[in-house]
Amino acid sequence: MKNQKHATIYGLSAVMLWSTVATAFKISLQHFSPLQLLFYSSLCCIMLLTAILGWQGKLQQVYHCIKTAPTHYLLLGTMNPFIYYLLLLQGYDLLPAQQAQPINYTWAITLTLLSIPILKQKITLLAFLACLVSYLGVLVISTKGELLSLNFSNPLGVLFLLTSTLFWALYWLLNTKQNHDPVVSLLACFLMGFPLLIISTAAFADFTIPHWHGFAGALYIGLFEMGFSFILWLNAMRLAENTAKISNLIFLAPFTSLIFIHYLLGESIHPATYVGLVLIITGIVLQQRLSHRSASIKGKKVAVN
């Protein structure tokens, strides 16, 4: 049954968890290399999803997913968790959290741009300009407002993060081709991608567990960033009477995240971060509204015909 109040509670809970992620990444990366952190976080997430699906009696569905489309899930698992999170963590390792976190939110714009060649969707000039507004925000944040000099604080870190949005968007676009339970599909992806993590960690890092602070961070990321936040958001969308109101909650996350970054990490938030973040969110909101309006117009034309 639909329940907007419960949907809002689930949605806000997911947003609150996402707001802490940038801080958790930076604290954990003080003890782990990006590859080690990804290995232990993914392991924790797999254990969580296995327990949840086992309690629901759905583990057999995971086996069925992988058996019926092994190549598809190997591809998805290679993207998420392996490539996406590795690039994301590399970016966080090189950049201040206040820069990395807003740039990561441009994945929504990347998704729009990739849907043009992959899903054959059309984009209007205004929607394209909205995308450019978001990327202007990235430039503002990356250069700390010094746009004319184009003096990036860490170009490699920015490149890692922008590339991670490409793989995250591709992952979600390819996910549109399957109709399994989202949690079942997520566990299938993690199981198929995890062997790559084992091999990579053995070859380029090690399995040493550092100070308990590091492992606590990996546990937190695996359970709450990769696992519970995803499930809470799914429940929010499932229960929502008005999905648009719930979807808009996600825009609270980057702003509340800056509070954790400032008070827990001790980063002094640069004015350019606020300006760039507003530009990024503005571009995303404008693009989404233009897309909804275009879809509404098309729907009316179909109804008239």
Image (spheres, rainbow, N blue to C red):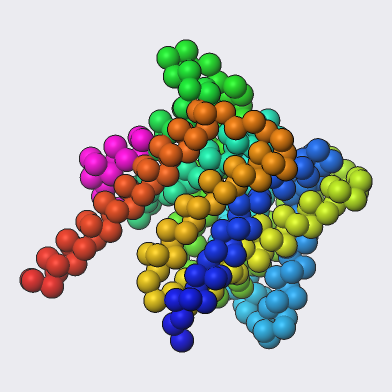
From this view, report whether residue 29 is shown above or below residue 246: above
Residue 108: x and y in percent read: 44, 49
Span shown in magenta: 120-133
Q: Is residue 88 left or right of residue 243?
A: right
Q: Overall secondary structure of the magenta stretch? A: helix
Foreground residue among 130 and 82: 130
In the picture, which quadrant includes the C terminus?
bottom left
Q: In x, y percent, where is residue 177?
A: 45, 65
Q: Position of residue 170 (x, y in %)?
A: 49, 51
Question: In screen coordinates, is 258 left or right of 196?
Answer: left
Q: Is residue 277 left or right of residue 244?
A: right
Residue at left offset 52%, top offset 32%? 273
Residue farthest left in this picture: 305
Residue 69 can be seen in this image: no
| Residue 40 part of the magenta-drawn span | no
* Residue found at x 8% / y 71%: 304
Q: Quadrant of residue 125?
A: top left
User: Which of these two is toward me, 279 or 68?
Assistant: 279
- Residue at x-position 55% and y-position 21%: 152
48 relative to 215, above or below: below
Is 128 covered by the magenta stretch? yes
- Looking at the rendered structure, the number of numbered marks drawn on it comes to 0
